[in-house]
Amino acid sequence: MRTKHAVTIETEPRIPLEEAPPVEVRPYAASDREAWSQYLGKHPQATFFHTLDWDEIIRRTFSHESRFLIAHRDGQISGILPLTRVSSAFFGTSLISVPFGVYGGLLVDDQKSADALLKAAGEVVATEKAKYAELRHLHRPDIDLPRNELYATFIEDVPGDAEGCLARLPRKARAEVRKCLKDELLTAEEEGISLEDFHRLFSLNKRKLGSPLFPSSLFWHIRDVLGAENAPILTVKRDGRVLATVMSFVFQDTIMPYYSGSAPDADRFRGNNFMYFKLMEWASERGLKKFDFGRSRVETGSFSFKKHQGFEPIPLSYDYLLAEGEEIPSLNPSNPKFRMAKRVFRRMPLWMAQKVGSWLVKRAPF
């Protein structure tokens, strides 16, 4: 569902200063780092993509500039909005909360803080001469903005033991995992793959989908900033050969498998089914409470796969502050305009797809 109406961004305040709520908004400063992190630690709706670690990874990899905002009342943070400026000759300038993340948007204590942050974000849109600001909400506050609902996410509780991990699977998926458990040649290993080989498998999958490939530096920066503990890699092998691999993010009590790759014959040996089951076990052993299977476009293959694994979809709301005359962007694989580009990517040699894709994603508001 896509809402068509626009919200005009004005540079002047629409209400007199004396009537403004007792909330002040200012840009994030380096001295706010500890307070920002503490706020995330206390807020029940915080996500990994609100963290300064993710911002650092994106800045290192893509050189995008941050325009983070903080709402505060009586010296205490009452809300935050991570915004990142993305600019290119192809797509113009936009503000994304947050790029290369599936969540982001407003994280607030109350409605007045949300209103104040939205007003300040509108001023940033005007100052930067951006087309729009996109707020990727997992937990949508009470706001009236145009939005799309192309995506859903999948989050379930992590069982307390291995038996529970198997029992939570629907009957058909459980039968598939049991076959894997009987295959003595199948193993699941922490790490078990170099970052170079991980990037290659990830790239093969992206090329198969006709999607732009990410630079290998992204994965090096992830591991450098987060370490193996908070960005673990689980690899499934059969007879010593890699079938499938996944890099996850661990944030607070949640594990989120985020980047993955698999060999062409992985489905033959149910490599992905086995991998995500073993990752659930891994999370259970470490006392994690939530398994966030991440975003999928509604009614796509990955959407169906996650439902097959016993996850129920949770609609996501991507909300937009639009500059005057602008419409909700359609930078997603559902857009018919990208069909030719997808066919071209599928046919490129891997080395070329990596170079072209890396160049493109650094200039697109993904």
Image (cartoon, grey):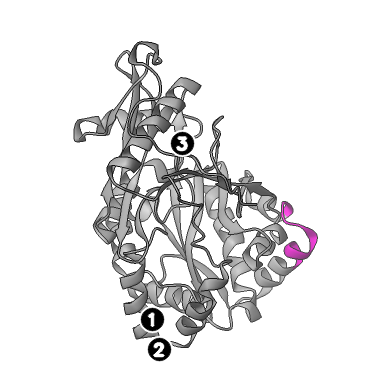
Q: Residue at label 1?
A: 353
The picture quadrant where one finds residue 170 is bottom right
Specify which label sits upstream in the sequence, 3 or 2. 3
Indicate the secondary structure of the residue bearing disc 1: helix
Specify which label sits upstream in the sequence, 1 or 3. 3
Kind of residue sitting beneath label 1 = Ala
Real-space CA distance between mark 3 and mark 2, rounded to the nearest whole angstrom: 40 Å
Determine if the magenta segment contains residue 208.
no
- Of circles 3 and 2, the one toward us is 2
Q: Are marks 1 and 3 in contact (CB under 8 Å)?
A: no
Q: Is residue 240 visible?
A: no
Kind of residue sitting beneath label 2 = Pro
Q: Which mark is residue 46?
A: 3
Which residue lies at the image location 43% right of the left edge and 45% below the top edge? Answer: 324
Which residue lies at the image location 58% right of the left edge and 54% below the top edge? Answer: 280
Q: Is residue 65 visible?
A: yes
- Of circles 1 and 3, the one toward us is 1
Q: Where residue 107 sits: x, y (%)?
A: 45, 33
Q: Using the image, determine if residue 144 lies above or below residue 186.
A: above
Taking the image as shown, residue 143 lies to the left or right of residue 91, namely right
